[in-house]
Image (cartoon, rainbow, N blue to C red):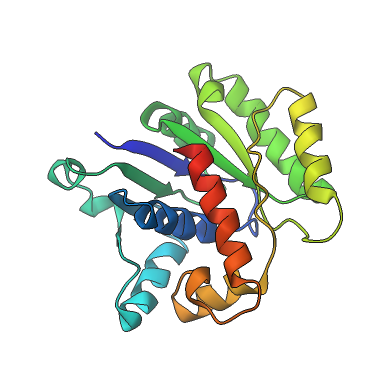
């Protein structure tokens, strides 16, 4: 069975679906058999991204709805990435903890974003095994300054597991979303740097 990585967040605008699409792309580039499940039915960002990608030959991996997940489709997978519903209910988070091997929580670095992330982490800490599976990934980090490093160390000082990689905020991600591509395929002076951040994070996770 594949390793299941669920990406979830209490707050919108932290790049959850962008991270899901790009992490799946990084796993695929590294030679892993990966599938992305878009469980965010209200928004469906990952599915829409994949539909746009179809105009350019696709992302290289499958993006499907939850109803299309069948056991036979999982047999040969190395990784199953789940783009969860935005702001999931507590019951859904408990269920997520039971079916995921890793819960990845993307968070921005502003005070409001970190406060929301801490609320989610506090809930997961009370769910027993869920906390052991949970890791924070700092996203949309300003490329200039030390906001990312400061947020990472602050969370670690509080006892949370935080990825070393900082996914910095570059225009290449927005351009990629608009075109239905991965940032590595966008004409942008920071595209390669943005992709390097994603590859680095993917290696930390698997």
User: What x and y, as percent, mark residue 102?
Assistant: 46, 33
How many marks can you see? 0
User: What x and y, as percent, mark residue 5?
Assistant: 42, 40
- Residue 172 or 95: which is nearer the viewer? 172
Q: Is residue 93 above or below residue 88?
A: above
Q: Is residue 5 above or below residue 113?
A: above
Q: Residue at x 33, y 43 (%)?
A: 79
Residue that protrudes farthest toward the top in the picture: 128
Instruction: Tell me the quadrant of the picture where the C terminus can be found.
Output: top left
Residue that protrudes farthest toward the left in the picture: 72
Q: Is residue 175 left or right of residue 118?
A: left
Q: Is residue 16 left or right of residue 181?
A: right
Instruction: Tell me the quadrant of the picture where the N terminus can be found.
Output: top left
Q: Residue at x 30, y 61 (%)?
A: 61
Q: Residue at x 42, y 71 (%)?
A: 49
- Residue 205 or 86: which is nearer the viewer? 205
User: What x and y, as percent, mark residue 70?
Assistant: 17, 46
- Residue 187 or 85: which is nearer the viewer? 187
Q: Residue at x 61, y 63 (%)?
A: 194
Q: Residue 115's quadrant in the figure?
A: top right
User: What x and y, as percent, mark residue 185?
Assistant: 47, 75
Viewer can see residue 100: yes
């Amino acid at each position: 069975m594949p390793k299941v990585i669920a990406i979830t967040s209490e707050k919108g605008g932290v790049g959850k679906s962008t991270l899901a699409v790009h992490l799946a792309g990084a796993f695929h580039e590294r030679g892993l058999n990966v599938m992305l499940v878009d469980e965010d039915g209200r928004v469906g960002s990952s599915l829409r991204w994949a539909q746009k990608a179809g105009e350019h030959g696709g992302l290289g991996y499958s993006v499907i709805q939850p109803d299309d997940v069948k056991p036979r489709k999982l047999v040969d997978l190395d990784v199953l990435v789940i783009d969860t519903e935005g702001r999931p209910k507590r019951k859904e988070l408990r269920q997520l903890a039971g079916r995921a091997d890793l819960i990845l929580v993307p968070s921005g670095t502003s005070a409001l974003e970190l406060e929301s992330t801490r609320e989610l982490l506090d809930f997961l800490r009370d769910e027993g095994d869920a906390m052991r599976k949970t890791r924070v990934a700092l996203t949309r980090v300003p490329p200039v300054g030390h906001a990312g490093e400061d947020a990472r160390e602050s969370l670690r000082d509080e006892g949370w597991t935080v990825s070393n990689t900082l996914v910095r905020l570059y225009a290449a991600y927005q351009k990629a979303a608009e075109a239905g591509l991965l940032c590595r395929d966008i004409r942008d002076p920071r595209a390669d740097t943005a992709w390097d951040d994603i590859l680095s994070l993917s290696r930390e996770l698997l």
